[in-house]
Image (cartoon, grey):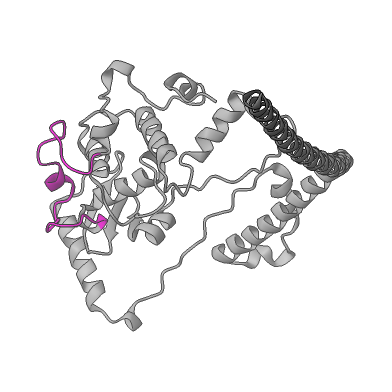
Amino acid sequence: MTMSFETMNRIAGFDSLGVQAYDYPSLENFFDNHLNLNDTEQLIDVVLPTHPGGEMKKKHMSLEGKILQGISVENILVRFGDRGGVRVSDCRVVHALLYGSPTLSWRHIVMMNTWVTRESSQRRFIPYARLISAMLVQQNCLPSEALWVSKPVEEFTWGHMKKNWKVEVKFSGNRYVVTDDMGNKFEVRTSGAPPVPEEDVEMEEEEEEEEEAEPSEARRPRQRYMRPHREINAEVAGFVTRRRVPSYKNFDRGQQEIFDNVSACIGEGREYNQRREAWEGSHGSSMLEYWEAQGAQRERMNKFMEEQEMFQAMQRSQMEHLAKMQEDEEARRRAWEEAEAARRQQEQELERRRWSAMSDTNETT
């Protein structure tokens, strides 16, 4: 599989600007956990306005920075652990998102982060799993018998922000108020909202103060309605309509929404079971044949391994017999050489004595 700017653009248009419009820091400078010459002036002070010094934490960021940091560690500079800590590389990304400088390329960050994770000896996860899976399918890098498991995409919702980032969003009409667990907050109004006079703002603040001052028992309960369930297809929507009882029209709005949501969950469950049974009916026989073929292949492999073990045992036995024959031949050769040396020594001794006797006879005559 090949990961490049071109292969990523075949899946989606991730970078909206041209290639020349972005800054491309080196791997060492981007992941350097200390400030370097290429960093923006007062990078830490801007991104972490309440940083007292020492270890950098997410709680030292502004409220906007906390939201962007949460998005970054899950979609841009992805990592598995240390979600509460902030690194200098995180500050570079958040500064780029807040102020537009430096102009960083998402594709470049993905490739650098993937490479660093791949080369790390302590890696615990694979970043950008959905992107890599899409590229595997796109480049046809999987065997034909590979099985797929479809997982739903986690949506970015206010409930996710409140649960994981401790950031809460309250809205009324076109007015949104974002607060965190530290008490920081900011207000956003949509583009279509009319301008609010200063008197109205002061009245809203006074009403909020009065509500805080009043005891909880004196407050009137607010009517909250659940969001209508979005059915996955027309069949589930028809099931929701058919399941309504005659007394449904006498329910209030909240009870009707709850009843329809429960009906939609039941209909989706039935739809899922029907699709699963249909899939098993159409692919069950082929899967059984595949599993039987896999079992026969395992049996053949086990038999082959047993034959290989027997062959190796025979080879070891032959090698041991050959080694013993070589040892016996070496012993016989040593015994013959020793006997030959003794015979030659005796012949030399007899020859010496014969010549000695002949010399004595000559002297006597």
* Outermost residue to the front: 365
Taking 230 as reference, is 273 left or right? Answer: right
Q: Is residue 24 above or below residue 118?
A: above
Image position of 169 with respect to 231: above or below: below
Residue 166 relative to residue 288: left or right: left
- Specify the quadrant of the image occupied by residue 306: top right
Residue 349, picture quadrant:
top right
| Secondary structure mainly formed by the magenta segment | loop
Q: Is residue 27 visible?
A: yes
Which quadrant would the C terminus be assigned to in this image? top right
Horizontal relation, residue 169 to residue 338: left or right: left
Q: Is residue 266 above or below residue 92?
A: below
**Nearest the eye: 104 or 304:** 304
The location of residue 307, given as percent across then percent down, is 86, 41
Q: Residue at x 40, y 42 (%)?
A: 120
Q: Is residue 56 magenta?
A: yes
Total marks shown come to: 0
Asked if the stretch drawn in magenta spans residue 305, the answer is no
Q: Is residue 54 left or right of residue 355?
A: left
Snapshot quadrant of residue 364: top right
Q: Which residue is pictured at 46% across the width and 65% down the height? A: 224
- Residue 174 in view (yes/no): no
Q: Quadrant of the N terminus?
A: top right
Pinpoint residue 276: horizontal percent, then vertical percent: 78, 47
Query: In x, y percent, where is residue 247?
Result: 70, 67
Please give the range of residues in magenta: 32-58
Question: Looking at this view, is 23 or 254 the one in front?
Answer: 23
- Residue under the image location 32 percent in, 80 percent down: 216
Pinpoint residue 137: horizontal percent, then vertical percent. Answer: 61, 29
